[in-house]
Amino acid sequence: PSEEELKAGELALQADMAIMYEMLESDDALKSAHDEIKRLNHLNAQLEIRINGLMNEKNEAIKMVKSLQHKLDKSTTYGKKH
């Protein structure tokens, strides 16, 4: 798609979002549900970021343990030869 088509699509999406937001805010029950959805989406995003961070820490710890185990195995083998 051309740059003009992308811009038109972006403007259409913004207009759709504005209309949807107005609809959600027009009814108290919908507004409450929308607020809760936004809160839960934010919480979910925070938790996903935390999980990714923990997985990275775990992977680094595994690499460190494997490296240390390799060094230990080498030093143990070296000690037996001499």
Image: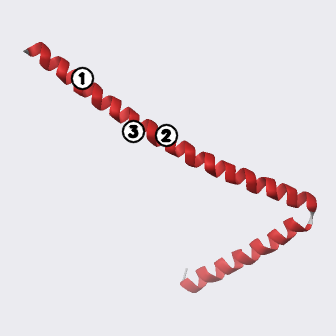
Q: Earlier in the sequence, mark 2 or mark 1?
A: 2
Above or below, 73 relative to 26? above
Q: Is residue 3 left or right of residue 34?
A: left
Above or below, 20 relative to 38? below
- Residue at mark 2: 55
- Hey, what amino acid is under mark 2? Met
Badge 1: few (under 14), some or many (20 or more) residues near its Cα, within 10 Å?
A: few
Q: Earlier in the sequence, mark 3 or mark 1?
A: 3
CA distance for labels 3 and 1: 18 Å
Please report the residue visible at 68 percent of the width from the left and 54 percent of the height from the top. 42
- Residue 72 coordinates in the image, percent (x, y): 24, 23
Instruction: Tell me the quarter of the image containing the N terminus.
Output: bottom right
Which of 40 and 5 lies nearest the eye of the viewer? 40
Please report the residue visible at 81 percent of the width from the left and 58 percent of the height from the top. 34
Instruction: Tell me the quarter of the image containing the C terminus.
Output: top left
The label shown at residue 72 is 1
Above or below, 34 relative to 47? below
Above or below, 39 relative to 65? below
Q: Secondary structure at mark 2?
A: helix
Q: Quadrant of residue 33?
A: bottom right
Badge 3: few (under 14), some or many (20 or more) residues near its Cα, within 10 Å?
A: few
- Hey, what amino acid is under mark 3? Glu
- Residue 63 coordinates in the image, percent (x, y): 35, 35
Q: Is residue 36 left or right of residue 50?
A: right
Please report the residue visible at 73 percent of the width from the left and 50 percent of the height from the top. 40
Q: Is residue 75 left or right of residue 82?
A: right
Q: Secondary structure at mark 3?
A: helix
- Residue 28 coordinates in the image, percent (x, y): 92, 61
Q: Quadrant of residue 76?
A: top left
The label shown at residue 60 is 3
